[in-house]
Amino acid sequence: MSRFPAYRPRRLRRSETLRRLVRETRVTVEQLVQPLFVVPGSGVEKPVGSMPGIAQLSVDRAAEECRRLADLGLPAVLLFGIPEQKDARASGATDPDGIIPRALGAIREAAPGLLLMTDVCLCEYTDHGHCGIVRDGDVDNDPTLELLAAEALAHARAGADLVAPSDMMDGRVGAIRRALDAAGFAQLPIMSYAAKFASAFYGPFREAAESAPQFGDRRSYQLDPPNAEEALREVALDIEEGADIVMVKPALPYLDIVRRVKERFGYPVAAYHVSGEYAMVKAAAARGWIDEGRVVAESLTAIRRAGADVVITYFAKDVARGLGRA
Ligand code: PBG
């Protein structure tokens, strides 16, 4: 049964104006979140080798950068902190004067309207690089929850607008929600890294955040990449425990999960277009093998089309400056 020649799909593809008119998915700057890596010191701007265009920034530089991001119309940043000292108990993570609390103060002053999201995890703060307290060679779930809750609370007290737990411990969203509520932060949203897979695409990030595990890997806490049903159970748990936005990570290799999470739960969904996805595009573009702007536009559109409401991407600033605009 064909409606041809009455229906000719090509009719609406014949000019950019027509194509724009009937376009089903749009990527707007208001939906993009720029991750930032904050390091101790001042005047520091240290490029991350595997992420061209991305640098570790000291608090003063991060504040200046955030003013530029806000001026470009970006709504939000996601902050990762690298402390002065790392230890087995991740002391820097819960320090009220730690790197993230200091960054929050300075950025708030420089860019008052910007939404300040903070990554809540211990891997940047532990000397072994794991996302929790290690006992007998594995991350010990329940004692880690207390530290994560204390870290989230330190961020809340320093002015975070949203906390984003990325550790993948069981029960952490509930532990953080209870701690926030008890301290008067019932209105502070949680964006949980709900379906976070044990992915090889995080490689460059671990250079940027200085958080590579010193032994083993993260497979005892992050999701096994082949498992979609389990990912949906993880998302269900986080929603029951109080997550307001649920994230899928990485993005492009997991668009099936993004779609299923959106359809099953109808919650705001975030997708994290991660460091390895960024690095691949940059590397191929630098060799002239792909058109960076078009690849970025197509990638972000695909992430949105799959059902993501919020896209966390290292390309956010470039897109806000016009990269990929047709
Ligand atoms: C911390 C964390 C990671 C990322 C975000 N939060 C790394 C990891 O789990 O090893 C990865 C982000 C990226 O690759 O861009 N747990």
Image (cartoon, helix red, strand yellow):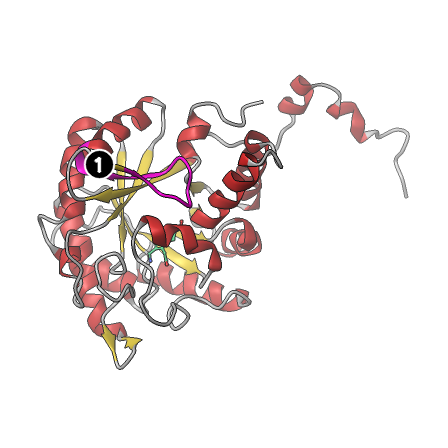
Q: Horizontal and vertical percent for residue 62?
A: 24, 34
- The residue sitting at 54% across, 64% down in the picture is 228
Q: How many marks?
A: 1
- The residue sitting at 52% across, 41% down in the picture is 283
In the image, residue 31 above or below residue 231: above
Residue 241, picture quadrant? bottom left
Q: Is residue 48 magenta?
A: yes
SS of the residue at dot 1? Answer: loop
Q: Nearer the viewer, residue 307 or 277?
A: 277
Q: In which quadrant is the N terminus drawn? A: top right
For the question of whether residue 147 can be seen, the reply is yes
Q: Horizontal and vertical percent for residue 177?
A: 23, 58
In the visual, does 302 lie left or right of 120? right
Task: Please state the extent of the stretch shown in magenta in the rendering.
Answer: 46-60
Label 1 CB less than 8 angstroms from ligand 1: no
Q: Nearer the viewer, residue 111 or 36?
A: 36
Q: Horizontal and vertical percent for residue 14?
A: 75, 21
In the visual, does 223 lie left or right of 284? left
Q: In which quadrant is the C terminus drawn? A: top right
Q: Nearer the viewer, residue 22 or 249?
A: 249
In the image, residue 153 above or below residue 68: below
Which residue lies under the disc numbered 1? 44
- The residue sitting at 40% across, 35% down in the picture is 53
In the image, residue 56 above or below residue 293: below
In the image, residue 69 above or below residue 38: above
